[in-house]
Amino acid sequence: MRKLLLPFSLLFWLGVAVRNWFFDVGILKTPKVGIPVISVGNISAGGVGKTPIIEMLIGNLGNNRRLSVVSRGYGRKSSGTIVVNDGYGNFASIENAGDEPSQLASKFPGLIVVVDEKRIRGAQKAVELGAEIILLDDGFQHRYLHRDLNLVVMTAEEILNGDWLLPAGNRREPMSSLKRADNLIITGCENIEQFDRASGMLKMQFKTGYYSALKAEEIIGLQTKFKSFKRILTDEKNTAEQLAGKKIVAVSGIGNPKSFELSLTDAGMVVVKHFKFSDHHWFSEEDIQMIIKARKTLDADFIITTEKDYMRLRDRYINFLNLEPIIIAEIQQAFIAGKDKLDISIKHLLG
């Protein structure tokens, strides 16, 4: 049915093309903030695994540098500039901050985290707070802020299957926009063979000169893996092998719930029910009771949710978290190709 919207996708493409041309010729400005900015973005709506990549970059860059993440703060119940964490442990509420910024602030207490729908204003605030490097979350389309390294994330499935522009598809920009990227990161690779197929498809397109500024040598491959499974009640951490064969009720309000469920299944767990809420969904008491009822009715061993969803549950449903057998699935991105390419890009950025 979405293909019926293709005429509107053409209009969407025209609007995107004109806007990008305004930036390219300088009619719309892209100011600098005086410190290095690394953007992690994508060309499609939906989850592609950007947050674990930002966490990986924080781990690589954090030694002796004051880092900041600047985000729009999708799903938050506020507007304007909000300092989620000033880097000294002063946190904003999750309602004002949003789930992903709160997750990053919680995991990295020394990280400066600022949310603002105007990224340039948020970046300027981060500089005021002492940031030395800014990681711009979901920043590819937000060209009002200059970035020194442009990382674009796409899933292997998206590349292999193709897609249309909004509203007929999920693309926010055409593939030709990849000419602005310094590195292309392919996530969700099941194995090196799938990465080779996806990168090979892109390399064929590169040969046509379609993405004139992006070279095939700048493609990086990542595989999403479970880092651990943390039990809320005991703080105990389990491996996927320890949970294999267990009956699971999955709960997610993320951009790519299908990938989450497949990962649980591939790890050997039996997903008897998956509650798929919209991305950044704020849980209600009715939702909680529905989840509890399903767990009991289906005699599931555990309820498993994501770190991002846990942030929206943490302060609002303490009894639920303390009384039910809930596990947080912690994920990470592992390199399967191109680690040296990203290391080189960052090294050049930092001089």
Image (cartoon, rainbow, N blue to C red):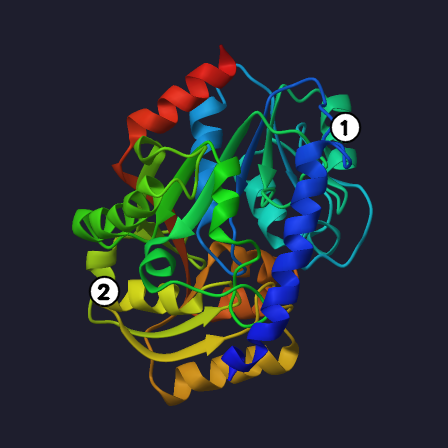
Tag 2's secondary structure? helix
Tell me the distance, in whole angstroms, between the alpha carbons under discs 2 and 1.
43 Å
Residue 325: % across, % down? 41, 68
Q: Residue furthest front?
A: 208
Viewer-proximal residue among 136 and 281: 136
Quick check: can you spot residue 84?
no
Q: What's the residue at 30%, 41% (across, down)?
A: 334
Q: Residue furthest top?
A: 351
Residue 145: % across, % down? 70, 33
Q: Counting residues from the N terminus, which is met first, the one under dot 2 or under dot 1?
A: 1
Viewer-proximal residue among 350 and 244: 350
Q: Quadrant location of residue 158?
A: bottom left
Q: Is residue 19 above or below residue 297?
A: above
**Mark 2 Cα-neighbour bin, 10 Å: few <14, some 14–19, many ≥20:** few
Q: Is residue 287 left or right of residue 217?
A: right
**Mark 1 Cα-neighbour bin, 10 Å: few <14, some 14–19, many ≥20:** some
Residue 302: % across, % down? 36, 71
Q: What's the residue at 75%, 47% (across, down)?
A: 117
Tag 1's secondary structure? helix
Q: What's the residue at 48%, 75% (across, down)?
A: 276
Nearer the camera: disc 2 or disc 1: 1
Q: Is residue 187 left or right of residue 34?
A: left
Viewer-proximal residue among 290 and 96: 96
Q: Mark 1: which amino acid? A: Gln
Which of the labelled discs sits on residue 266, or is there none?
2
Which of the labelled discs sits on residue 124, or is there none?
1
Q: Is residue 140 left or right of residue 233?
A: right
Q: Mark 2: which amino acid? A: Asp
Q: Is residue 164 above or below residue 351?
A: below
